[in-house]
């Protein structure tokens, strides 16, 4: 009996020590959020964040919690990590199990000024995890017919979530729905890991890219399903070391680098790896889009083990700049056949375009044939 009590006490003490050293939870409901889908809960989110951020230090990993089973109506807001004290091992988490919604009618969005850049802005984060079983639904339908010169409230459609000037951020398991424009943009950030997202908007909604990356390095996007009206993933200038893998893309416009060099500007994108992607009902697969200027030079691109069907006749389109040709292009084991089932017609139906490619090679079987690539073994 004595022994039992002793064990009990020890384990209680152990528990206590454990809980004081671990995470403290800041539930938005405790900061006045209602979560009925009608009451604006923006201030409660800001207050819960402020408390979580303030409590962060080398010993705690605070959690800002958005509980499940509720819907939180939010005006455009910013969570700024500038004054948080998160470290490599003690990072702040935002757990979103509920639904975040924006005002359904675009006239009801409250903006200061007409530069309507985003709905949710996360900036200056140093060590942050955003995760949960919840969803981020901007209910963007009312924005999709906005003409850019219509300037009563906004001169452009906002992006749902922007992560900016941040370092070591994980975003995982969430669903994004119906953004007015892009669903997520990663800007001027590094070490960003995105996993298990589900992003969905109608295939005919305008510019609703899934994830856009700009001026960022060491970004990984994996195991996600993206179905939207524009690029599933797009990579803009100043981006380096981007890994994309295990993505189900479509409907949408595919995965793109660019457009680069619009005003003849010097813009760079380097070390992009895309693998294990399934495109379904997309207008394109992989694209590198550049303007016809001398500012952009494309080199060292390899296409490896790509197979499927194409609705358009030209399945491979390598149209490079006259002044700066594409260099060192490799295609290996490519099979893009026509979607047309007729066996007799099929062979001739897909074709390729190839202009201004130097040092282009092919290995294995490349269908359709790309005559400007030299055969290599
Ligand atoms: C990208 O992939 C390469 C090779 O698999 C790996 O070495 C690198 O760490 C990855 N980078 C990121 C940001 O995940
Ligand atoms: C392209 O590859 C060649 C060798 O295959 C290498 O020498 C060159 O530095 C590479 N260029 C870039 C921009 O990575």
Image (spheres, rainbow, N blue to C red):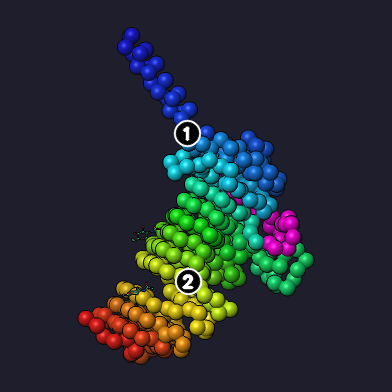
The residue nearer to you, when weighing 44 against 267, is 267
**Residue at the disc numbered 1:** 59
Residue at the image point whose x is 49% and y is 47% from the top: 127
Question: In the image, is residue 109 part of the stretch drawn in magenta?
Answer: yes
| Quadrant of the rendered image holding ligand 2 | bottom left
For mark 1, does the 10 Å Cα neighbourhood hold few (<14), some (14 to 19), or many (20 or more) residues? some
Picture coordinates of residue 22, whole percent (x, y): 46, 32
Q: Residue furthest right?
A: 152
Picture coordinates of residue 354, whole percent (x, y): 40, 88
C-beta proximity under 8 Å, tags 2 and 1? no
95 sits left or right of 338 in the view? right
Residue 268: give its label: 2
Q: Quadrant of the C terminus?
A: bottom left
Dominant secondary structure (helix, strand or loop) of the stretch shown in magenta: loop
Picture coordinates of residue 120, whole percent (x, y): 61, 54
Residue at the image point whose x is 46% and y is 70% from the top: 269
Question: In the image, is residue 125 part of the stretch drawn in magenta?
Answer: no
């Amino acid at each position: 009996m004595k022994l039992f009590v002793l064990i009990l006490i020890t384990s209680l003490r152990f528990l206590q020590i454990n809980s004081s050293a671990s995470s403290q939870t800041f539930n938005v409901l405790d900061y006045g959020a209602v979560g009925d889908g009608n009451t604006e809960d923006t201030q409660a989110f800001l207050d819960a964040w402020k408390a979580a951020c303030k409590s962060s230090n080398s010993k705690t990993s605070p959690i800002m919690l958005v509980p499940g089973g509720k819907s939180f109506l939010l005006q455009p807001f910013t969570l700024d990590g500038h004054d948080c004290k998160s470290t490599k091992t003690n990072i702040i988490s935002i757990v979103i199990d509920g639904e975040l919604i924006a005002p359904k009618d675009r006239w009801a969005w409250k903006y200061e000024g007409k530069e309507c850049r985003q709905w949710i802005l996360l900036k200056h984060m140093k060590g942050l995890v955003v995760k949960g079983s919840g969803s981020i639904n901007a209910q963007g339908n009312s924005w999709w017919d906005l003409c850019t010169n219509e300037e009563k409230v906004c001169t452009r459609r906002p992006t749902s979530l922007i992560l900016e000037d941040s370092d070591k951020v994980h975003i995982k398991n969430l669903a994004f729905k119906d953004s007015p424009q892009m669903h997520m943009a990663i800007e001027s950030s590094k070490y960003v890991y995105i996993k298990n997202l589900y992003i969905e908007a109608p295939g005919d909604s305008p510019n609703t890219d899934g994830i856009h990356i700009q001026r960022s390095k060491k970004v990984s996007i994996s195991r996600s399903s993206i179905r939207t009206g524009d690029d599933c993933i797009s990579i803009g200038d100043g981006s380096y070391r981007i890994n994309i893998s295990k993505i189900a893309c479509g409907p949408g416009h595919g995965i793109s680098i660019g457009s680069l060099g619009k005003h003849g500007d010097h813009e760079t994108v380097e070390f992009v790896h895309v693998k294990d992607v399934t495109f379904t009902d997309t207008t394109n697969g992989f694209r590198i889009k550049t303007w016809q200027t001398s500012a952009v030079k494309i080199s060292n691109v390899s296409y490896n083990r790509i197979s499927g069907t194409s609705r358009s006749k030209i399945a491979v389109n390598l149209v490079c700049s006259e002044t700066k040709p594409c260099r060192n292009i490799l295609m290996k084991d490519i099979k893009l056949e026509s979607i047309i089932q007729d066996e007799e017609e099929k062979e001739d139906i897909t074709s390729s375009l190839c202009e201004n490619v130097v040092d282009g090679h092919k290995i294995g079987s490349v269908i359709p044939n790309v005559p400007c690539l030299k055969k290599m073994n």
